[in-house]
Amino acid sequence: MAKGSYPEPMRMGRSDRQQFNNASPEAADQLVLGREAYEERAWDDAYRFLARVDEATSLAVDDLERLAMSAYLTGRDDEYLRALERTHHAYLDAGRCQRAARCAFWLGLRLVFRGEMAPAKGWFGRAHRLLEREQHECVEQGYLMLPHVEQNLAAGNFEAAYAAASGAVEIGEHFADVDLVACARHLQGRVLLRQQRTTEGFALLDEAMVSVTAGELSPLLTGLIYCSVIEACQQVHALGRAREWTSALGRWCSEQPQLISFSGTCLMHRAEIMRISGAWQDAVDEAQNAVERLTRSNNRKDTAGAWYQLAEVHRLRGDFDAAEQAYRSASQYGLEPQPGLALLRLAKRHTDAAAATIRRVMDTTADQVHRIRLLPAHVEIMLAADHVEEAQRACRELENCAEAYGTELLMALATHARGAVELAEGEAQPAAVRLRQAIERWQQVDAPYEAARVRVMMGLAFRALGDSDGAALELQAAGAVFQQLGAVPDLSRVDTLLGMCPDETCGLSARELQVLRLVASGKTNKQIANDLHLSGKTVDRHVSNIFNKLDVPTRTAATAWAYEHRLI
C-alpha cells in the first residue's frame, strides 16, 4: 500500500547533482546529505542541510516538502507552516492541484492543533475548492473527511462522525493509502468508544495500531495516531492499553534521537503512568522534560497536560506552593486544572472552596468522558464536606460509567467510591467488603498510592466494627506505602489516626516525622536526601530541628524516641 502523505525516504546518489545545474557543487552536496538524513530519519540534520540549500537556491517541490516535514518533526512549527505553504503554491504553479489540496489540508490541521480556527477553516475551504475542479475521485477527498469526523465527534454527533470515518476508510482502501486507512479506522474506534461500544472500539484501535507499530505509516501519521490512541485509552481509563502504547511510542521516539514533536507528548503520557504506578520522582522528571520539549514545539495542549501532571505529584507530596504554581501554568496553556486544583483546596482544608469549585465544574461539563475524570474527586470532596447524598449521586454516575466501559481503572475507581460512601453512611461491614475489592483492583493495575488510601478507609471500617488490631494493621500498611512514596499529607493523617497526637510528636512537622523515621531506620543524611529528593542542607536542617524539638543529643537517642512512639 502507498503512504503518500509526505515524501518517502529515497536513496539518492551523487549522480543526482546533474539535476541541479544551477546549484553550486556545495549546494548539491548539501542536498544529497539532506536527502540521506531524511531517509535515515535524522530530522534535525535533514532540516539543516535542506535549509542551507534553500537559502542558496530554490528547492524543488519534493525537497521543499521534505524541508517542511523535517521542520515539523524537530519542533520548528512556524518554519513548518511557512515551508508547507510554499510547497502548496509550488504544486499550484505546477498544476498539481491534488497535491496542493493535500498541503492545504495539512496546513489547516496544524492550525486546528494551534487553536487558530479561522485560518484553519480557510485552508480546508481552499482544499475543497481545489478538488471541486477535478473531474475524478482522488485520495485527498478522503483526507478532507477527517476534520468532519473530529467536528462531529466533539459535538456528540456520533453517527455522523462514524459515517464520515467509514467513508474515509473506503477512499483510503480504494487508493491503497495506508496512512488514510489507519487514521480513519482509528477514528472509527474512537467514535465507538464514545458510544460505549468498548469491545468494538478497542478492536478498531488495535487494528489501526498494527500499521503504526509495523512501521507502515509516514512519521507524521505514526506520531499523530500514537498520541490519539493513547489519549482515547486514558479518557476511558484503559490503563493497561495506555501503558502498552505509551511504551511503544517511547521506543519509536528513542529510535529517532532528533525527533522533538512527539517525544514531548510521549514524556507527558509517561509522567501520568509513572505517577499512577508510584514512581513519583520519575514522573516529575518526565513531566519537566515534557514541558521543555512541548514548549519548543508550540504544543500548548500537551504542555498544559505536562504542567498538570507535575502539579499532581507536588500536591500528593504536600508541596502545595509548587502544586499551585504548576496548576496555574497548566491554566495559562489552556487547560482547566481540575479536579486537581479542587483537591488541592481540600488538602489545604478549604473544604467549602473545594466543594464550590467541583460543583461548578460538574455543572458546566456535559461530555461524559470529561465527567469521568471529575467524578472520583466529586465523591471525595462531597464526603469531606458532609454532603453524603450528593456524593451518593456522583458515585452512582461513576458506577454507571464503569459498567458501560468496563475498563480496569474505572472499575477500581467506582468500587473505591462506593466503599467510601458506604463508610460515610455508617455501613461499616459492607464498606469493608467493598474496600477489600477496591484494594485488589488497585493492586491489579499497579497503583500503590490509591491502594494505600483505600487501606486507610479499611482501617476506619475495622475500627468502627470494633477490630482495633485489624485497623492498626491496615493503617500501618498504608503508612509504610505513604512513607515510601513521600506522600507527606497522607502520612500525617495516618499518624494522627494511629494516635500520634500533636503533644506526642513534640511539635515535629509531617516532613520532620518522615525524616525521623528514616534516621531511625539507619539511613545517613545523604541517603535521606536521595530518598526524599531534597538537598543535603535541607535534610541537615530537618535533623537539627528534630534534635532540638525532642531535646536529644544524638541519632541514637532520636531513634530510641521513634521506637518508643511506635514510628518504626
Image: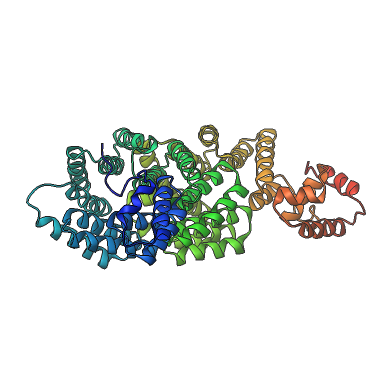
- Residue 411 vs 150, above or below: the answer is above
Q: Position of residue 247 (x, y in %)?
A: 49, 39
How many numbered discs sit on the rendered protein?
A: 0
Q: Residue at x 63, y 53 (%)?
A: 317
* Residue 389 in view here: no
Q: Colour scheme in the image? A: rainbow
Q: Position of residue 403 (x, y in %)?
A: 36, 36
- Residue 407 vs 53, above or below: the answer is above
Of the pair 58 and 542, the residue shown nearer to us: 58
Give the side of residue 179 with respect to residue 431, left or right.
left
Q: Residue furthest left?
A: 135
Q: Position of residue 533 (x, y in %)?
A: 69, 52
Give the side of residue 76 with respect to residue 350, left or right.
left
Give the side of residue 423 with respect to residue 117, left or right.
right
Q: Residue at x 42, y 56 (%)?
A: 30
- Residue 134 vs 440, above or below: the answer is below
Q: Position of residue 520 (x, y in %)?
A: 82, 44
* Residue 190 in view here: yes
Q: Residue at x 64, y 53 (%)?
A: 489
Q: Residue at x 39, y 50 (%)?
A: 35
Give the quadrant of the N terminus.
Answer: top left
Q: Quadrant of residue 356?
A: bottom left
Give the side of residue 163 with respect to residue 150, left or right.
left
Give the quadrant of the C terminus.
Answer: top right
